[in-house]
Image (cartoon, helix red, strand yellow):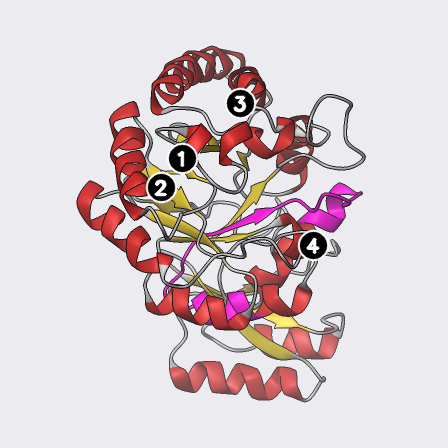
Amino acid sequence: MIISKAPTLTDAQLAEVEAIVGEFNCKIQVIYGAHRNIYAIIGDERSETMVNRILGLDYVDRVDRMESVYKLMDKRSDLSNHRIRVGTVDIGSEPLIIAGQCTIDPKNPQTFLETAAGVKEAGAHALRGGIWKPRTSPHSFQGTSASMGTLLEARERTGLPVIAEVMDESQLRIAVEARVDMLQVGTRNALNYTLLAEIGRATAEQGIPVLLKRGRHMGPVDEFISAAEYVVANGNPNVVFCPRGSMPALDGYRNHPDESITPLLKERSWAPVIADPSHSVGRARYVPAAALAAIAYGADGLIIESHVNPISGIGDDPKQSITPDVLAGIIRDVKAVWKLRSRFNE
């Protein structure tokens, strides 16, 4: 990574650097930070000649070389002080709570609007709503782009930032053009490197935060972090990890709860962690305990499925969504655990 003396390189300076690294079959990827840009060398950066030529430029402060396979996501990288903001919350300053329905029912948009009002009153900071849904069976409801209008209306009514899952490039274009506040990459696309790279490119300029869920069959921690590297290496440093349960399932739960991965992620990467207790346990009655456990393990927030009348919902809502009243209790208890956890970190 090239660290310039000024917050950004001029076009002429960037062109000069690109010409140098190009001679060594490398290229430059610009990472747009809030206060300064970082210029990542993509390719084999071990050439001493290349590094020395870059260091010889009077506008370059230093060149950092990382041995880690995830050079940008590594806790020792120059992104280690990077902070991500969602709505009014700087992630890490307080527990970020994202809540809302698993799926927006296009036949009943009013219910989603009522849910949005309910989760705001409960204390949530952002609103989730499934527009497009990955389903095991091709005959199940897959969502509809028409629901984007409902999601945006809920944002206008409540003032809450909104998050939407995208599964392909066409959905990505719609979400970016709609200026959603956060994108979600679901477990089935957690290792879809082509999509992850395209998300990084498509969101680099706007810096839209990306919530990357852990794949159900994903094994090593490094594999999860390396998946996030695809987004960052293509220009967007605003990536958030999301443990959501893994396979094989633990008998009685939907998945095997994996909130305990959070300390391992934080030891190796600077990126924040937002846990998903709803998909981990898969039953509304287990969600409160799973949520508190995630915070105790060090998560920076939660994404929770909530519905004003879960039994009338579609998708996963009937079995794993909690009501806004229950959400309010979870948020109260989460704040208490957060304060208790902070004492151990003093």
Of badges 1 and 3, nearer the viewer stands 3
C-beta proximity under 8 Å, tags 3 and 4:
no
The residue carrying pointer 2 sits among few (fewer than 14), some (14 to 19) or many (20 or more) residues within 10 Å by Cα, namely many
| In the depicted structure, whether residue 323 falls above or below residue 228 | above
Measured in 3D between alpha carbons, the distance from the residue under mark 1 to the one under mark 3, in whole angstroms, is: 13 Å
Residue 213: x and y in percent read 60, 46
The residue carrying pointer 4 sits among few (fewer than 14), some (14 to 19) or many (20 or more) residues within 10 Å by Cα, namely many
User: Residue at position x 60%, y 34% from top?
Assistant: 279
Which of the labelled discs sits on residue 127, or is there none?
Answer: 2
Measured in 3D between alpha carbons, the distance from the residue under mark 2 to the one under mark 3, in whole angstroms, is: 18 Å
Which of the labelled discs sits on residue 99, or is there none?
Answer: 1
Q: Earlier in the sequence, mark 2 or mark 3?
A: 2
Of badges 1 and 4, nearer the viewer stands 1
**Kind of residue at disc 3:** Ala
The residue carrying pointer 3 sits among few (fewer than 14), some (14 to 19) or many (20 or more) residues within 10 Å by Cα, namely many
Segment tinted magenta in the rendering? 198-224
C-beta proximity under 8 Å, tags 1 and 2:
yes
Q: Earlier in the sequence, mark 3 or mark 4?
A: 4
Q: Secondary structure at mark 4?
A: helix
Q: Is residue 33 visible?
A: yes
Q: Is residue 311 magenta?
A: no
Q: Is residue 212 magenta?
A: yes
Residue under label 4 = 226
